[in-house]
Amino acid sequence: MMRMKHTRVPLKLHELRSDIKTELDNYTDDEQAAILNRFLQRLKMKRHTDTRFGHIKEAFQPPYVWLLIAGGIALPVMLYIVFIWSSLQLEG
């Protein structure tokens, strides 16, 4: 297993924070507050949707989805065949 150095991560975070700060300095205080509030709301919504849909994604793994699709296609066809076969048996 390859070991990664974590010394680069704090530097990258520091660079990102300084980039965000310099970009926010281009706006007025009211605009900065609006931008930061919108950013925080998006972060909270992303966390909420990730946790909410995480259980659904785990329940529907690809093999189960294909089985459900195949069953959904096959069931009406089988019911139609049984209906036709039984009606032919009753007539004969």
Image (spheres, rainbow, N blue to C red):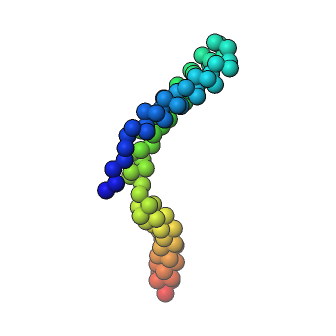
Is 57 rendered above or below residue 27? below
Q: Residue at x 51, y 68 (%)?
A: 73
Please state which of residues 90 and 54 is positioned toward the viewer in this rendering: 54
Query: Number of marks in the image?
Result: 0
Q: Residue at x 65, y 13 (%)?
A: 30
Residue 3, horizontal then vertical, whole percent: 33, 50
Please state which of residues 92 and 15 is positioned toward the viewer in this rendering: 15
Quadrant in the rendering for residue 29: top right
Q: Is residue 24 left or right of residue 83?
A: right
Q: Residue at x 58, y 22 (%)?
A: 21
Q: Is residue 34 left or right of residue 1?
A: right
Q: Residue furthest top?
A: 29
Instruction: Give the quarter of the figure containing the N terminus.
Output: bottom left
* Residue 82 visible: yes
Q: Residue at x 48, y 35 (%)?
A: 12
Q: Residue furthest left?
A: 1
Please state which of residues 88 and 26 is positioned toward the viewer in this rendering: 26
* Residue 41 visible: no
Is 16 rendered above or below residue 63? above
Q: Is residue 72 left or right of residue 38?
A: left
Is 92 rendered above or below residue 41? below
Residue 25, horizontal then vertical, whole percent: 64, 18
Residue 11, horizontal then vertical, whole percent: 46, 33
